Every structure is written in structure tokens, then in C-alpha cells.
Image (cartoon, grey):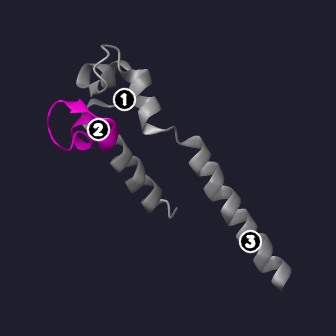
Amino acid sequence: MRKIIFAAAAVALFAAGAANAQMPAPADVVKNMDKDGDSAISKDEWAAAGRPAERFDAVDTNKDGKISVAELEAVFAAMRARAGQ
């Protein structure tokens, strides 16, 4: 019985680690999508990267028309929390 519980825990930890490994760092996302060099993602840059325009407004929590690293970090943290990580 202990072996089964240990194996299940190991699988759960591996799955959580794999999910984390697949999520890029918010700063890297901004760096890759930021084409004008202002250290933020504009709605045009967001759309040019193939992201749904309607999601931009949800991520741009301070409604300044740009997504900052901090805003993206908050979204990623919420995603991890929903996934139980």
C-alpha cells in the first residue's frame, strides 16, 4: 500500500513540475512580444503574436493599454493556483 501511495505522489509531483517547466517566465514573454522596446506588450503586439484580442483587456488590469511583466506574473500565478500548483 505504501508503494502505491508513494508512486501516486511521485507522479503528482512530476506532473506539477512538468506543468511549471512548460510555463515561460513572464519577463521572457514580454521580451519576445515587445517589438517597440518599451518593456510592455501593447494590444497590437499582443494581436500580432496571435493572442486573442479579448484576452488583452483581462490581462491589462490597470487599463493603461499595455501589459507589464507584473500583470503577466499575476495572470501566471492565478493560472498556477487554478491548476493546484
Describe the element under mark 1 as helix, strand or loop: loop
Q: Which mark is residue 8?
A: 3
Using the image, determine if residue 48 lies above or below residue 70: above
Distance Cα–Cα, label 1 vs label 2 = 8 Å
User: Are the two marked residues, 3 and 2, in contact with CB atoms closer than 8 angstroms?
Assistant: no
Q: Is residue 68 above or below residue 44?
A: below
The picture quadrant where one finds residue 70 is: top left
Residue 65 painted magenta: yes
Q: Position of residue 83 (x, y in %)?
A: 49, 59
Instruction: Specify the farthest residue to the top.
Output: 36
Residue at image x 31%, y 20%? Answer: 45
Residue position marked by numbered label 2 in the rendering? 55
Please rate how many residues cluster around mark 2, counting C-alpha atoms within 10 Å: few if below 14, some from 14 to 19, many from 20: few
Q: Is residue 42 left or right of residue 14?
A: left
Name the residue nearer the viewer: 38 or 81: 38
Question: In the rendered structure, which disc, 3 or 1, sits on the residue that comes first in sequence?
Answer: 3
Q: Amino acid at mark 1?
A: Arg
Q: Residue furthest bottom?
A: 1
Q: Position of residue 44 (x, y in %)?
A: 26, 19
Magenta-colored span: 55-71
Say whether marks 1 and 2 touch (CB < 8 Å).
Answer: yes
Q: Residue at x 61, y 45 (%)?
A: 21
SS class of the residue under badge 2? helix
Q: Is 36 one of the magenta-colored residues?
A: no
Q: Are marks 3 and 1 in contact (CB under 8 Å)?
A: no
Q: Identify the disc placed on residue 51.
A: 1
